[in-house]
Amino acid sequence: MTSLRARAVTGGILWAVAIIVLGLAGLASYLSSQTQARFVEVLETRHSQAIVAVSNNSDAASDLVRAIGDLVYQVPNSGQYWQVESADGTIYASPSLGEERLPRPTGRSFERLRREFTGPNAEPVFAFGQWVTVPDGSTWHVQVASSLSSFEQEQAVLRNTLLTAFAFVSLASVLAALMQVAVVLRPLNQLRQEVSGRWEQEDGLEVASYPVEVAPLVNDINTLMERNRDIMRRSRRQAADLAHAIKTPSAIMRNELDTLMSQGADVQEATDALDRLDAQLRRSFARMRADGTDATVGVATDLDTSLGRMRRAFSALARNESKTFKATYAEGLRVRMDQSDFEEVMGNLLDNALKWATSEVRLDAGQTPDGQIMITISDDGPGIPKEELEKATQSGQRLDTSKPGTGLGLAIAHDLIHAYGGKIILSRDDDLGGLAVHMRLPFATAKRSD
Amino acid sequence: MRILIAEDEPVLASQLKKTLMSEGLTVDVAIDGAEAQYLGETEPYDVIILDLGLPIRDGLTVLKNLRSGGNDTSILILTARNDWTDRVDGLDAGADDYLTKPFHMAELSARVRALIRRKAGKATPVFSKNEVTFDTRTNQVMVDGVPTNLTSQEIAVLSYLFHNSGRLVSRTELSDHIYQHDGDRDSNTIAVFVNRLRKKLGSDLIETVRGRGYVIKATA
């Protein structure tokens, strides 16, 4: 069973069933024995009263009906009966017996005997009978009986009442279990929300805000998050170091080849091989970067800062080529991307735009109504023909070889944006006439103020 | 024109130096960040080529230190790192241009020339005055359309004066910009170079302001 809630509810139900079965059995048996004792006690009292009545009226037995005057004996089939028999076999009985008679025990016991037998109307009855010798010396058999059906009815009512009460108790205990589960699970829910919603907080989760039972888990999650960030940082650094280690020798080889070529040697094949090597390296490093990007790890980039840097850097580069670069963006925007990844995307695309632009490159950033960040980079260069727009973002596609570069910029931007769940669309810019690159990037929630 | 190459890889540094010197530029090499900053602060370079991955003091720190010290020499950063963040860091810290490794030497020298030209406020790579034209891309000097052979020192003097045309340049400044940091300097030899240039290119191209220096007057 994987659900904690289901476990708790099942536990609650089993507990309630145990309470009902044990409690009901115990209580019912106690109450039943109490009722039975009272029933017997009442009948004993009635028997004693009947004996007293016989003693007082042994000379005029016909007065017994009056003497044992309780109303319940008067009503026919009331379930309460008495029957008195003289030594000579004359039987006096309560009017409630009508024509029926109670059976007499065979022995002649002067002890009070309790018996159960089938009485009038085939009802089970409980009876006390005893031979008594009255003061005038005569002996009588005095018997009182009470129908058990009323007793059993009483027992049934008791059982029903108890069952109803216990049903309520068990329902309440299941509800209580549910509530308890909700309360107990609340920190776990909070944890889940924080883990999914607050990854971007570099400072991790606040261990102190969790119960002691959950705190170790929160601690572990923090450690994992930190380790994850560490691994990412380390692998990036390693990739960068590797790139650095390979690129300088590659530059040296290229220069040697250039020198040889200027001296008339045929180095075309070696140059091509080196070009392929460089392109492959650049591609692999870009791929490593995109693969090493875990969009769930807490990252966010402040566009005020990052686009500000881009604006200053590319304004300078544009000036070098007597071109202009304009960046327009709303304040306070944040994207859920690592800053170096975001700048990698912007750098590649702006570099492309600047390379192709005749005189102007523009960057516009804003927020869409559904909360995403929309960035458009456009230029007044030749653009890309409609039929080649899609091909342009595929890896390593170089549409035009007339300008330097490996043609990877768009592909790198495409891979990185996809790694973060964003979108990139190319089109013709209506205003400037060149290429427009539209990017839809995930929005990052505002930084906590504390 | 004096260039500082700050690059710790000796082979690459020597390749760079060879290429730039073959184009008539005067080149010093610094092999670590501390030396690069020291030379940058004390010598009047026209362009500094600064590798970001320098030992002792990284290139970005050197760049920031130079800029915060008021040094406005054109700086071209070289980086082997893929990351745009590194390049933007450099540009944002005041670099004028960047080049990523591996690069073509031709690309590098074109960038260096463009930086020199931009600093001089010249839009075109070809200077001309009277009947003399000087193509900074090839160091080709023509008089009335006829190519003229000049020595590398002569080209260095002519190039510096052309890039600073309209401005009086002292002998000291000239020698500062055409001699290496540890080279023998003799400002009298400047006068020798100028005389040779006059003989080859005509006496009215370079004017002497007695006791102060030389000037190529700006074309109207």
Image: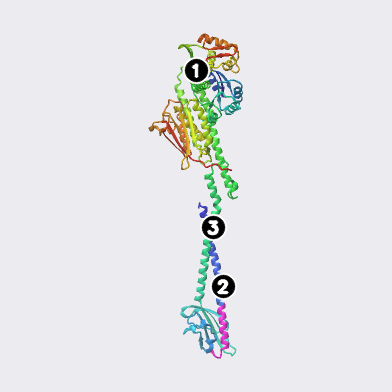
Q: Are marks 2 and 3 in contact (CB under 8 Å)?
A: no
Mark 1 residue crowding within 10 angstroms, few (<14) / some (14–19) / many (20+): many
Q: Is residue A373 above or below residue A125?
A: above
Q: Which residue is mark 2?
A: A34
Which residue ends up furthest to the left in the rendered image?
Answer: A387
Chain for numbered disc 1:
B
- The answer, for residue A242, to whether it is visible in the render is no
| Colouring | rainbow
Q: Which residues are the magenta region?
A: A41-61
Q: Between A326 and A413, which is closer to the camera in this rendering?
A: A326
Chain for numbered disc 2:
A
Q: Which mark is residue A343?
A: none
Q: Which residue is mark 1?
A: B136
Number of numbered discs on residues: 3
Which residue ends up furthest to the top in the rendered image?
Answer: B199
Identify the image quadrant of the N terminus of chain B: top right
Of label 2 and label 3, which has the lower sequence position? Answer: 2
Whole-percent x and y of residue A19?
Answer: 54, 63
SS for callout 1:
loop
Q: Which residue is mark 3?
A: A177
Amino acid type, residue under disc 3 in the picture: Ala
The answer to whether residue A309 is left or right of residue A382 is right
Mark 3 residue crowding within 10 angstroms, few (<14) / some (14–19) / many (20+): many
Q: Is residue A53 magenta?
A: yes
Whole-percent x and y of residue A310?
Answer: 51, 32
Q: Are marks 1 and 2 on the same chain?
A: no
Amino acid type, residue under disc 1 in the picture: Thr
Chain for numbered disc 3:
A
Q: Is residue A111 magenta?
A: no
- The answer, for residue A10, to whether it is visible in the render is yes
Whole-percent x and y of residue A146?
Answer: 52, 79
Magenta stretch, overall SS: helix
